[in-house]
Amino acid sequence: MSEWVEASVVERIRWNDALISLRFEAELEPFEAGQFIRAGLDVDGERIGRPYSLVNAPDERPHEIYFNVVREGPLSPRLAQLRSGEGFWVAPTPNGFLTLDEIPAARDLWLLATGTGVGPFLSILKTAAPWSRFEKVVLGHSVHTQGELSYQETIREMQQRHPAQFRFVPFITREPCDGQLCQRIPASIEDGALERKAGLDLAPETAHVMLCGNSGMLQDALASLEKRGMKRHRRREPGHVSMEKYH
């Protein structure tokens, strides 16, 4: 397949001024839930591309990406302006190792994300694999404000389908909150608030944690998990924590 193929926008979802989802049709190669593609546009004679995780499950169409608009960025503000029927470019071969096939056996799965890092976890949760493989599944999503908690209808549907198995834990870090955890993910690991909210122990004997988000969260959350006896997972050295920097 060629290096780039055309994608056609099916729908644009504007969650707020800075958060956009694009649903699109394109001839992509088969992918695993949790992987990403490169999306691009031609700007001043140069094709600019950036990685974006797929939110849709592998068998779900149209494809979908979820991204934050970087105001001074060369690509995301332009992608955010695309409407139904308009086109952009995608690299057809998905990549990435934030997939369930890459992690070892565990009783419980913890998916902890900041911002648009929740996208690949939604793709994973739309498949049958986590529900058949793990006893409990926890999704933690940390955002600055209540209005940034996107995909709530999708998450409610998961709660309805798997009421005894699924726990959703939202975090609000920059405004007063009610019913969510008003702290960062690493702090909630440190003081046990995440465990209390999820009603589940976070321990190396039972859990595998997947982290996706900004570098500060990844670094601090890993440090907090290491205090619990958990270590980063690598192919040659199995562990308890898989992670991917999202921006």
Image (cartoon, rainbow, N blue to C red):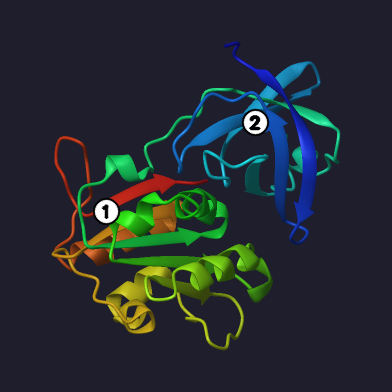
Residue in the foreground of this view, choosing between 189 and 26: 26
Rendered residue at 38%/76% (across/down): 164
Asked which secondary structure carries label 2, the reply is strand
Q: Would you say 19 lies left or right of 45 here?
A: left
Of mark 1 and mark 2, the one earlier in the sequence is: 2
Rendered residue at 51%/49% (across/down): 123
Q: Would you say 52 lies left or right of 130 here?
A: right
Query: Crowdedness of circle 1 by 10 Å Cα count: few (<14), some, many (20+)?
Result: many
Q: Are marks 1 and 2 in contact (CB under 8 Å)?
A: no
Rendered residue at 33%/84% (across/down): 196
Tell me residue 227's x, y (percent): 18, 67
Tell me residue 44's x, y (percent): 81, 20
Q: Would you say 232 lies left or right of 169 here?
A: left
In this rendering, is residue 207 above or below 64? below
Residue 241's tag is 1
- Point out the image quarter for the N terminus: top right
Tell me residue 115's x, y (percent): 56, 59
